[in-house]
Image (cartoon, rainbow, N blue to C red):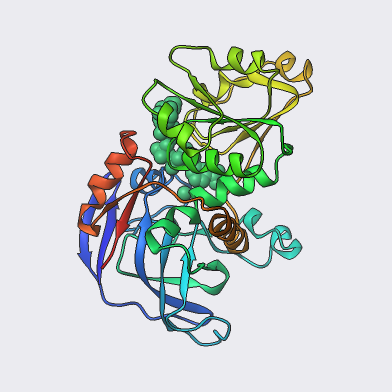
Amino acid sequence: MKTIQITSPGAFALVEKELPLPGPFQVRIKVKATGICHSDSYTVLGTFPGVTYPRIPGHEIAGIIDAVGQGVYSWKKDQRVGVGWAGIRCRRCQACRRGDFILCQNHQITGIHYDGGYAEYMIASVESLAALPDEISFEEAAPLLCAGVTTFNALRNSQARPGDLVAIQSIGGLGHLAIQFANKMGFKTVAISKGAEKEELAVRLGAHIYINSEKENAAEELSKLNGAKVILATAPSGKAISTLIDGLGNNGQLLVVGSSNEPIQVTSMQLIRKRCAICGWPSGTAFDSENALQFCAQTGIRPMIETFALEKAQEAYQHMMDNKARFRSVLKFD
Ligand SMILES: NC(=O)c1ccc[n+]([C@@H]2O[C@H](COP(=O)([O-])OP(=O)(O)OC[C@H]3O[C@@H](n4cnc5c(N)ncnc54)[C@H](OP(=O)(O)O)[C@@H]3O)[C@@H](O)[C@H]2O)c1
Ligand SMILES: [Zn+2]
């Protein structure tokens, strides 16, 4: 099988490998599409704890089961499935025992701690499998397995209720799906992006209000609207996220999904005065992914994608890193 491996930080290589065999409680997936998430930079740059080389990145995978290992009864060959960030849990820690798998502290993450979807085939454990609805194509399903489930899950577990003002910061892979989810969940939806270029697309995706953060102070604009109940921050920048805190309303929640090594800076008064909270949200389980996929099938939400062949993975990755993807680069397999 053809694979794209990261062999050392920043080095992509096209490598032919033997077809792997699924072990007990595992399946082999014939990959049909893999989305390129900003978090793939953890593998490419080697910045996530525990990443080793060579490693095949990719944690937004859609495909069909092509072989099943011992002990697999509930999944069948030829079934359409997806795999996301949540790969293999330890089953021993407190979070696993409580059933809160996404908080497993010994989690092996897809495309980081074991090989992911920049490949024609991959091995996945049964606990990481989400069934794909027939209505959603492989290439549209792939980004929903991370960008989709992360924003869907963060918003559905947030403090916002229908009618509340919810702002989405940054319109990339996560942000463009978050705008659609926020709209369909009944929130008054604000999109915040740098420049005017993405305004028309943001409105088409369901934003009721657009804030150009290059021209206007986004926090002030949100304050004029009485402040946001939730700001879902998808920017990969602590500095950019910090600028929005004063845009929260009373009891507002800054919900951080965009990750970077920069600190988020806040004074105590910024939080105390309006009883605000800052919290994070990590992706979701395979079951959460099935919920997100079903929600998309019901409501018509789909990612906007640009497809690339596996051989063009480095180009597709760079396209995303350069903020040129509208809005998700997806590797498509024949
Ligand atoms: N919590 C989780 O479970 C989870 C899951 C997936 C991804 N993530 C993280 O979420 C973030 C977004 O991922 P993505 O796949 O949506 O990325 P993406 O497609 O590259 O989009 C990120 C967007 O953020 C803005 N941006 C880019 N660089 C920036 C910078 N230096 N400063 C300020 N804004 C910047 C741009 O939007 P505008 O042009 O509109 O400003 C860009 O389109 C990444 O940090 C990723 O690692 C977290
Ligand atoms: Zn991701």
Q: Quadrant of the N terminus?
A: bottom left
117 lies left or right of 229: left
Q: Can you give x and y, in whole percent of width and height, for residue 87 in the image?
A: 52, 63
Residue at 40% from the left image edge and 29% from the top image edge: 198
63 versus 219 height, above or below: below
**Numbered label tally:** 0
97 lies left or right of 61: right
Camera-side residue: 171 or 43? 171
Q: Can you give x and y, in whole percent of width and height, for residue 8 in the image?
A: 28, 49
80 lies left or right of 127: left
296 versus 119 height, above or below: above
222 versus 145 height, above or below: above
Q: Quadrant of the C terminus?
A: bottom left
Camera-side residue: 95 or 134? 134
Whether residue 285 is visible to the viewer of this picture, yes or no, is yes
Whether residue 57 is visible to the viewer of this picture, yes or no, is no
Residue at 30% from the left image edge and 77% from the top image edge: 19
Q: Quadrant of residue 168?
A: top right
Residue at 54% from the left image edge and 74% from the top image edge: 126
Q: Can you give x and y, in whole percent of width and height, for residue 325 in the image?
A: 33, 40
Residue at 65% from the left image edge and 53% from the top image edge: 103
